[in-house]
């Protein structure tokens, strides 16, 4: 509520329209709603302790939402979060988690996140290191236009075993 309605407001009786939107958040409770979810947490954290959520002005947390327009009203539903952590002054490292009920939206959320980073921050390059076994994550990066730039054997410990990671990157288009 309180959101501006889009130009193509849905008339009563029409089917609702949904689209994915992102916004920067500094609220750790929003991030926790996703990363502590029982369908997400086992994929990103192997311990009993709380998932660490570092806070710094150079770390960008983006909340991904579905905005649903229906009969003149707007409803926002949180579907996931992204974190972009600084590598250096030019490159950031992306992370994403999508709530189980909203799987299927990760690619669009990451596309929006990458575009937001290039538009709103000094970021020139986004550099990801997905574990090779996380096929869905690798696929999301591929579909967003990331290229495979390298391979890092035995660089990720997960439940006591060392796993390989891809190095994948996407660059800001020169303006
Ligand atoms: C990784 C994650 C963000 C992907 O989100 P999503 O909404 O499922 O992404 P999309 O549906 O847009 O795309 C996923 C792609 O991977 C594929 N995929 C999904 N699960 C797969 C699996 N187990 N094996 C192979 N491919 C798989 C999908 O088919 C799709 O590819 P396609 O469009 O070519 O068919 C989501 O699964 C998630 O939050 N996982 C838990 C957290 C996590 O692992 N984060 C990354 C930490 S490195």
Image (spheres, rainbow, N blue to C red):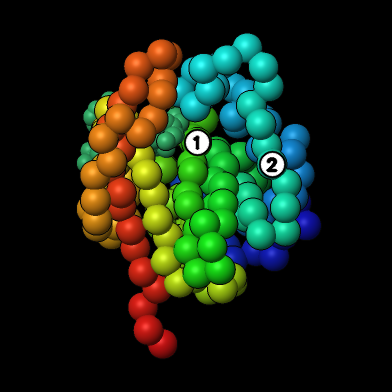
Q: Residues within 10 Å of mark 2 (few under 14, many from 20)?
A: few
Residue 48 lies, in percent from the top left, at 63, 12
The residue at the point 41 percent across, 24 percent down is: 157
Along the viewing direction, whichever of 115 and 57 lies nearer the viewer: 57
CA gap, disc 2 and disc 1: 16 Å
Against 61, residue 42 (above or below) is above
* Residue contact at pointers 2 and 1, CB within 8 angstroms: no
The residue at the point 37 percent across, 44 percent down is: 129
Residue 72 position by quadrant: bottom right
Mark nearest the camera among 2 and 1 is: 2
Against 160, residue 37 (above or below) is below
Residue 23 lies, in percent from the top left, at 63, 56
* Quadrant of the frame with the C terminus: bottom left
Residue 168 lies, in percent from the top left, at 30, 52
Residue 173 position by quadrant: bottom left
Residue 107 visible, this angle:
no
Secondary element at image label 1: strand
Q: Which residue is mark 2?
A: 54
Q: Which residue is mark 1?
A: 97
- In the rendered view, does 19 fall on the left or right side of 140? right
The residue at the point 50 percent across, 36 percent down is: 97
Task: Name the residue furthest bottom.
Answer: 175
Mark 1 C-beta to ligand 1 under 8 Å: yes
Secondary element at image label 2: loop
Number of residue marks: 2
Residue 89 visible, this angle:
yes
- In the rendered view, does 119 fall on the left or right side of 138? right
């Amino acid at each position: 509520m309180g959101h501006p309605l889009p130009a193509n407001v849905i008339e009563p009786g029409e089917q609702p329209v949904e689209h994915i939107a992102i916004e920067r958040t500094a609220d750790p409770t929003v991030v926790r709603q996703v990363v502590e979810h029982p369908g997400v947490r086992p994929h990103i954290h192997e311990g009993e302790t709380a998932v660490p959520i570092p806070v710094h002005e150079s770390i960008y947390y983006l909340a991904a939402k579905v905005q649903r327009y229906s009969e003149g009203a707007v409803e926002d539903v949180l579907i996931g979060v992204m974190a972009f952590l600084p590598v250096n002054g030019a490159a950031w490292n992306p992370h994403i988690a999508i709530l189980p009920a909203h799987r299927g939206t990760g690619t669009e959320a990451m596309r929006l996140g990458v575009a937001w980073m290039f538009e709103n921050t000094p970021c020139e390059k986004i550099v990801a290191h997905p574990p090779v076994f996380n096929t869905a994550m690798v696929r999301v990066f591929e579909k967003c236009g990331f290229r495979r730039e390298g391979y890092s054997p035995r660089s990720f410990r997960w439940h006591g075993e060392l796993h390989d990671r891809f190095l994948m990157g996407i660059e800001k288009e020169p303006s």
